Amino acid sequence: MTRKMHFGLFLLGTGSHIAGWRVPGAVDTFEDIEAVRQIAATAERGLFDLIFMGDNLNADPSAHPSYTARLEPLTLLSAVAGATKHIGLGGTVSTTYSDPYTVARAFASLDHISGGRAVWNAVTTAAPAAAANFGTQHPDHSKRYEIAGEFLDVVKGLWDCWADDAIVANRETGLYIDPARVKALDHEGEFFKVKGPLNISRSPQGHPIISQAGGSEPGQQLAARTADIVFAVVQDMAEAQAGYKSLKDRLPALGRKPEDVCVLPGVMPVVGRTAQEAREKLAELMRFVDAKNALGMLSERFGTDMSAYDLDGPIPDLPEADTYKSFTGVMLAKAKREGGTLRDVYNMVAAARGHWVLVGSAEEVADTLQLWFESGAADGFNVMPPYFPGAFDDFVDLVIPILQERGLFRTAYEGPTLRHLLGLERPVNPNF
């Protein structure tokens, strides 16, 4: 079978560009469920594999509009599930500020509700400000990943507490659940003590899909061990190839195959019918960016107050951030490689929160995505439109048909669950 691209849609209601909501006709809120349902319908029309929602656990009015005014992901995705049939539904929940039992139960529920389309984006939460909302101290980077490793093991263990055939529902004998087909977890570790089992049966996918986005050494190792999808932060193809190879090379030692993990670099496509039209669209977006509206996000990314620095001066020597290590490393490397200033980094944050921006005609965008896909840099892409619906419509209506004509992307959905779409096997339950 010919290898096909996979596409995720990074869903921010006001778009990934910090000022995309100011474009005439753009969605200007992330709290409008009907707008989100329409976006999901467009993604399904474009045969995307999944919708993916990030999340924030603190409110900062100076941050991205969709970071502060937003609905809770699992609540929103449950509402979207009934308005879609095929597309995967991914939501972010923190391993630092949640508990394994609740997370395991919530995503098993979403998997049942959606008929096997749930995705848990497991994050460690980079922003220290979140800690104040939970009455605790923010763990350092290494400790957050230690917690995450045990957290993921507990969640997967809870999903395996039920055999697939545990519910008997025998009206003649009166036996509803076969007790021999349900087991306690009895986990007692460094960070968590969880008896189990869940009070919900094994879900359609066995395990809901797990996605992660960590690009640091501990992040890559955790992803190699536990993730089905990895969202990568990149700025050029060589960098993407190196990260792709590093992750895939870790898998055999963990008993996994390269095709067991789908790597989706983030990309903000600005598509035009011509290259000039695309450049004009980006220029219009950047005209909405001033010296202040992305400063909060820049400071969050670097874990320090960036207002003290001259945006038009050289890139300062900054302490290593304990927050968004992947983002800061990628952005600084690109700026230094190209001899840029701090304003160039600022504009990267404003345009796509530090992700790769791809500008061009539909043919040029398709050519670039194909090159990356065929050159060992990606298994597909996490598409981050600058605004909705127009910029996303451009990608679905102009780029997707070209990739389909080239045999690089599906022309119909392949099966009922997200595991079918990603080509992933249903996990074997080791307990039964």
Image (tube, helix red, strand yellow):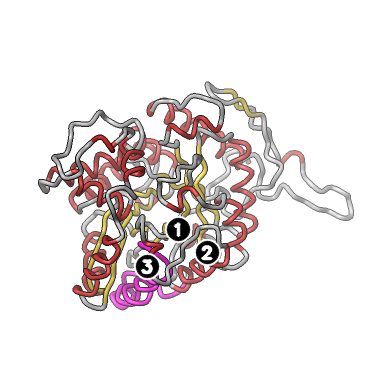
| Image position, residue 61 (x, y; %) | 45, 45
In-image side of 161 versus 233 (left or right): right
Q: Residue at image x 16%, y 45%?
A: 312
Give the Cα separation between the discs numbered 3 and 2: 18 Å
Name the amino acid type tagged 3: Val
Q: Residue at image x 74%, y 50%?
A: 167
Give the Cα separation between the discs numbered 2 and 1: 8 Å
Residue stretch in magenta: 385-412
Q: Mark 3 points at which residue?
A: 23
The answer to the question of whether label 3 and label 2 lie on touching residues, with beta carbons closer than 8 A, is no
Q: Name the residue under label 2.
A: 36
- Name the foreground residue: 214 vs 378: 214
Asked whether residue 383 appears in the rendered view, the answer is no
Name the amino acid type tagged 2: Val
| Mark earlier in primary sequence (3, 1) | 1
The answer to the question of whether label 2 and label 1 lie on touching residues, with beta carbons closer than 8 A, is yes
Q: In which quarter of the image is the C terminus?
A: top right
Q: Is residue 397 found inside the magenta-colored segment of the image?
A: yes
Q: Residue at image x 64%, y 55%?
A: 112
